[in-house]
């Protein structure tokens, strides 16, 4: 199968690329032009293409020649030096308009299936009584998730007007070897042995290991029942922040140190210092029901949450040597 992979040099893209190679697919990878001449040797077996930027003006048709399936991972998730308005415009330009533009040209070139990795944030930032499911009314809560939701909507519109099937995947927080951002910060925090205010925390958070996310994407690439569907994927286990830290600390060979702070006090304090999102991530609930993909496609996580955490922490410890 001829596959076009965007975001190939990202956290998920690198892992997915390696498995696609093992399965002997013919892979075309898209990179930003700023990486031209600096692409890692591991991508030597792909057909590389370089684009200036990913937005509503990108020309894709030459790149899409002969492609059967597009797996669209490329997106921007964090911008630290922009104003709120600049960030909003940039998220829309890349994550919404860029997706729309790629999908339109893919459909015109006869691509059979478009697999889009979105975000559980499209459902909302915290649960309001029960796990998130694909049946929920969407509630994107920031510029990133609004752009992802708009991309999901326009992909469905394109699907109704063309022969190209669309599959949307909404993962929660992804972790695994080489993880960055918030999960890496948590690993650093646990490793430091610093006392943490989670003694009374009993929230529920869903996660997905890198291996499980890659595996779910691969199933959505060619399963006959996947076309036209949206799937929420996870490790099928929800943990509290305290439980997650305990599991990480156990693999590290450390004893976590917790102290108690009332929920209301922590919420007030973090709100005052402009860190309300930190409270929601660490004290709030965000858990999901992934049963739909199991019923439709027979997919279940190959790696348990305990196995995924063990592999991630062992990579982290080795990286510190």
Image: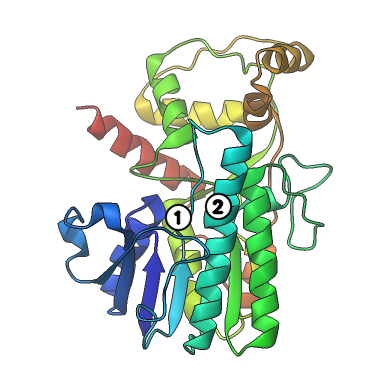
Residue 185 against residue 27 in the figure, above or below: above
Numbered marks: total? 2
- Is residue 171 among the parts visible in the rendering? no
Residue 16 location (% of width, % of height): 37, 63
Residue at 36% x, 35% y: name it.
Answer: 313
Residue 13 location (% of width, % of height): 37, 58
Residue 72 against residue 263 in the figure, above or below: below
Q: Residue furthest front?
A: 57
Residue 120 against residue 296 in the figure, above or below: above
Quadrant occupied by the N terminus: bottom left
**Displayed quadrant of residue 177:** top left
Q: Nearer the viewer, residue 110 or 279?
A: 110
* Crowd tier of the residue under label 1, counting other residues whose Cα lies within 10 Å: few below 14, some 14–19, many 20 or above: some
217 sits to left or right of 120: left
186 sits to left or right of 281: left
Residue 235 is labelled as 2
Residue 167 location (% of width, % of height): 59, 73
Residue 114 location (% of width, % of height): 53, 76
Q: Are marks 1 and 2 in contact (CB under 8 Å)?
A: yes
**Displayed quadrant of residue 49:** bottom left
Instruction: Determine which residue is flagged by label 1.
Output: 303
Mark 1 to mark 2: distance in Å?
8 Å
- Is residue 42 among the parts visible in the rendering? yes
């Amino acid at each position: 199968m001829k596959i076009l992979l965007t975001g190939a040099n990202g956290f998920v893209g690198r892992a997915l690329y390696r498995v696609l190679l093992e399965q002997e697919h013919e892979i075309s990878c898209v990179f930003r032009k700023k990486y031209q001449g600096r692409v890692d040797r591991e991508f030597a077996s792909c057909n590389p293409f370089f684009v200036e930027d990913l937005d509503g003006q990108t020309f894709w048709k030459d790149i899409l020649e002969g492609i059967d399936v597009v797996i669209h991972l490329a997106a921007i998730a964090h911008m630290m030096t922009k104003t709120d308005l600049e960030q909003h415009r940039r998220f829309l330009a890349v994550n919404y308009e860029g997706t729309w533009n790629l999908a339109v040209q893919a459909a015109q070139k006869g691509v059979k299936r478009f697999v889009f990795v979105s975000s559980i944030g499209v459902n909302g930032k915290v649960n309001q009584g029960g796990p998130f499911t694909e049946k929920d009314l969407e509630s994107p809560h920031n510029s990133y998730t609004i752009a992802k939701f708009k991309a999901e909507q326009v992909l469905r519109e394109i699907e109704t007007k063309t022969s190209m099937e669309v599959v949307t995947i909404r993962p929660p927080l992804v972790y695994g070897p080489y993880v960055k951002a918030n999960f890496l910060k948590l690993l650093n925090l646990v490793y430091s042995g610093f006392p943490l205010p989670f003694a009374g925390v009993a929230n529920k958070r869903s996660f997905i290991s890198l291996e499980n996310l890659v595996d779910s994407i691969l199933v959505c690439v060619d399963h006959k029942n996947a076309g036209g569907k949206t799937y929420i994927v996870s490790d099928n286990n929800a943990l509290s922040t305290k439980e997650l830290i305990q599991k990480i600390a156990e693999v590290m060979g450390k004893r976590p140190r917790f102290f108690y702070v009332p929920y209301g006090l922590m919420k007030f304090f973090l709100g005052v210092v402009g860190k309300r999102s930190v409270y929601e991530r660490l004290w709030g609930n965000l858990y999901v029901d992934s049963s739909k993909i199991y019923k439709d496609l027979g997919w279940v996580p190959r790696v348990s949450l305990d196995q995924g955490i063990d592999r991630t922490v062992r990579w982290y410890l080795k990286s510190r040597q």
